[in-house]
Image: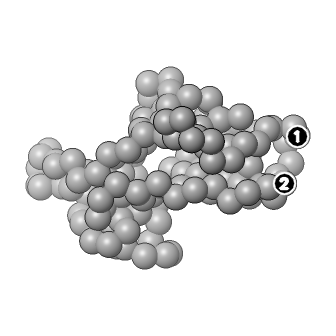
Amino acid sequence: MRLTKRLGIITSSTLISAGALLAASAAPATAATPVFCNGHYLCVEEVGQSIDTMYIDMWPPTDSFKGHFQLQTPEGTSTSSGNRTNLPGSGNEVTLTVPVVYGKYCATAWKWNGGSSYTKLGYLCFTAGA
């Protein structure tokens, strides 16, 4: 289940948009959330939330790779997409779900080299929450 955008995201010192959780029902965002990208293999966008869950889309903007995406939360936990062939372009996003917590989230694109060997292809952090 994917809900509408309602979460403010800020990076470094730039305020992109702000929102607040006022009710458990979904409501349209007042401004679109930004897309953050790092290199050829990692773009991240907050695409929605419920009262306690945030939905983050991750995808490679230009080049495909076999591997997975990882998202670390402000609480120090992480979630991963699992290895797969990640293709660039709309419709190929991986959606990860994490608890809504204000703070710094960090995303990583990992190329699978076989076995338990990985290469970091992209990394970025953003602050989310309202």
Give the quarter of the figure containing the N terminus.
Answer: bottom right
What residue appears at the point 12 percent right and 55 percent down from the top-left corner? Answer: 113
Task: Name which residue lies at 50% across and 31% down.
Answer: 104
* Mark 2 neighbour density, 10 Å: few (under 14) some (14–19) many (20 or more): some
Residue 64, horizontal then vertical, whole percent: 27, 71
Three-letter amino acid code at disc 1?
Answer: Ala
SS for callout 2: loop
The answer to whether residue 111 is above or below residue 124 is below
Q: Which residue is mark 1?
A: 23
10 Å crowding of disc 1: few (<14), some (14-19), many (20+): few
* Res 73 seen here: yes
Q: Is residue 96 left or right of residue 124?
A: right
**Residue closer to the observer: 65 or 124:** 124
- Residue at 24% in and 66% down: 65
Tell me if label 1 and label 2 are in contact, CB under 8 Å.
yes
Q: Position of residue 89 (x, y in %)?
A: 43, 76
- Residue 41 percent coordinates (x, y): 30, 61
CA gap between label 1 and label 2 equals: 9 Å
Please tell me whether residue 116 is drawn above or below residue 93 in the rendered image: above
Residue 127 image point, x, y percent: 54, 36
47 relative position to 122: left or right: right
Q: Nearer the viewer, residue 42 or 82?
A: 42
SS under mark 1: loop
Q: Is residue 83 visible?
A: no
User: Which residue is rendered at x = 57% and y = 56% of the image?
Assistant: 34
The residue type indicated by label 2 comes to: Ala
Disc marking residue 94: none
Question: Residue 27: which numbered mark, if any?
Answer: 2
Say which quarter of the image contains residue 111.
Answer: bottom left
